[in-house]
Amino acid sequence: MQLSLKTVKDPAALRTGCLVLPVSEGAGLEGASALVDRACGLRLSRLIAAEHFSGAAGRSMVAHALPGLAAARVVLMGVGKPGTLDAAGARKALSSALGTIRSTGTTDAVVLTEGMAVKDRDGAWLLRQLGMLAETGGYRYSRTLSKPEPAPRLARLAVGLDTKPPRALSVALSEGGAIGRGMNLARELGNTPANICTPTHLAEQARALARRHTRLRCRVLDEKQMLALGMHSLLSVTAGTREPARLIVLEYRGGTKDERPYALVGKGITFDSGGISLKPGAGMDEMKFDMCGAASVLGTMQALAETAPAMNVVAVVAACENMPSGSATRPGDVVKSMAGITIEILNTDAEGRLILCDALTYVKRFKPRSIVDIATLTGACVVALGKHATGLFSNDDALAAELLAAGNEAHDRAWQMPVWDDYQEQLKSNFADVANIGGPNAGSVTAACFLSRFTTGEKWAHLDIAGTAWEQGAAKGATGRPVGLLLRYLLSKA
Ligand code: BES
Ligand code: MN
Ligand code: ZN
């Protein structure tokens, strides 16, 4: 999607496939919208009355071939009662308008956002959201469909302002676009079935990113190299499958050579059957989404490469499959992690923490300023927070606050949970330094506590995206979260 800003002096004379005008609830057409209405002989206000178009945020409608206008059609975008539009309402308004634009089959559109003041948010925020929604709204999964629906035709979207567009706004719009494309990459990887989206496939995707962007460098470790590093915890998870595991290291270099990087670590279980602690059958297909942490890391790295901030970021993705077989790890097995900490694997389905602990140990060699891991780690997190908030755990309150703020800003929100020492004793084992499960209570907290054992001395946060990484039911599919949160956080550090 080509996203741009332009100055629009006379919207009635604007030649476009689709002119998008805000309509307030109650107040109707104001400003530029009223100008356009007069140019077409008040046909818009008559249409609004005849159709009982409320102007509520999230409602939109289309009007074709209006005399007096150069635009082929007009989309009316409800923005709610004047002065009441909040962040959620603005997103609803934009998504609905974009859906209506796409349904018309137009290849280009111009949105006049002038009448869209959002409470507690600035114009840059609105354009970031617009850029993001323009990209994500056009995503369709098609890889394994023999008759995919045709891709939406909308290819160019401009924002029209009555003044010369300030640079901050064009930066915001393109940043939004980059976030949206990053989310789409994450969604595509998440949605791709596990027989295609293997650890090898993820590594190939990372390599392809590095080929496309000069600031990205990719290195992929195989099992032999992981063995040499002593990653027995990670390797215990991959023991039951024929798919080779991969440790993907993707570096973004936008800062000086010796500048310490920010680190992202992603869980890339390309399929989680549970292993010998086999999962129940119902809904097991959804465990192809167990690599969504890894996917969000790759999506964020792509968005980073596209926005090109002056900073260094290193991403480590631990990718493998968790399967049962004669060579699989057994409950009760004890393995030694790369950090030297021994782990009693009481449940082979608590495998995410087993691959992450070695990846977290590995990433320390980059001397990161902070480490954020992203993982579909626990069903318990979905019980605690549902599908709206990502679980946030951290050993550093300042880092936690920054991530919460980034989530609020991007409307990709997280909620902080405790990592108190009080919970650590649930991980006691009689046969190893630590057990990989902590019993039925506070499952997402004890999972975070397990990870915290491997990040002592580091500024570390863990994002449990088990509830937020994909939708279930009729809309089943990856969401691309938390690319928005992660990119906001990183850019706030640039
Ligand atoms: N990938 C799952 C977590 C998960 C489950 C995410 C359902 C989304 C939906 C993870 O590997 C897992 O199986 N966790 C176990 C941990 C338990 C054995 C301590 C869980 O949550 O049941
Ligand atoms: Mn599992
Ligand atoms: Zn898992």
Image (cartoon, grey):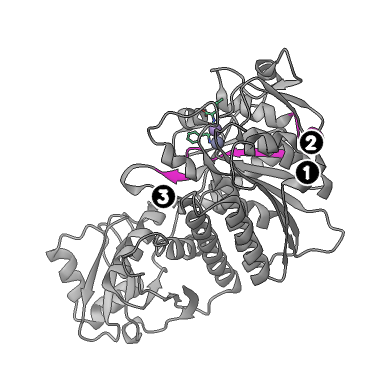
Q: Looking at numbered disc 2 in the image, what kind of residue is underneath it?
A: Met
**Residue reaching furthest front?**
326
| Secondary structure category for the residue under label 3 | strand
Nearer the observer, 187 or 351: 351
Q: Earlier in the sequence, mark 2 or mark 3?
A: 2
Q: Which disc number belongs to residue 362? A: 1
Q: Which residues are magenta?
A: 453-471
Q: Earlier in the sequence, mark 3 or mark 1?
A: 1
Q: Can you tell which quarter of the image residue 118 is in?
A: bottom left
Within-10-Å neighbours for mark 3: few <14, some 14–19, many 20+: some
Q: Nearer the viewer, mark 1 or mark 2?
A: 2
Q: Which disc number belongs to residue 180? A: none
Q: Is residue 186 left or right of residue 352?
A: left
**Residue reaching furthest right?**
258
Q: Looking at numbered disc 1 in the image, what kind of residue is underneath it?
A: Tyr
> Is residue 22 at all visible to an observer of this figure?
yes
Residue 26 part of the magenta segment: no
Q: Looking at numbered disc 3 in the image, what kind of residue is underneath it?
A: Gly
| Secondary structure category for the residue under label 1 | helix
The answer to whether residue 282 is above or below residue 365 is above
Q: Position of residue 51 (x, y in %)?
A: 14, 63
Within-10-Å neighbours for mark 1: few <14, some 14–19, many 20+: some
| Residue that appears at 71% across and 20% down | 421
| Residue that appears at 65% across and 40% down | 401
The residue under label 2 is: 338
Q: Is residue 62 left or right of residue 234?
A: left
| Residue that appears at 31% across and 65% down | 147
Q: Can you tell which quarter of the image residue 375 is in?
A: top right
The answer to whether residue 227 is above or below residue 168 is above
The residue under label 3 is: 477
Q: Nearer the viewer, mark 2 or mark 3?
A: 2
C-alpha distance separating marks 1 and 2: 8 Å
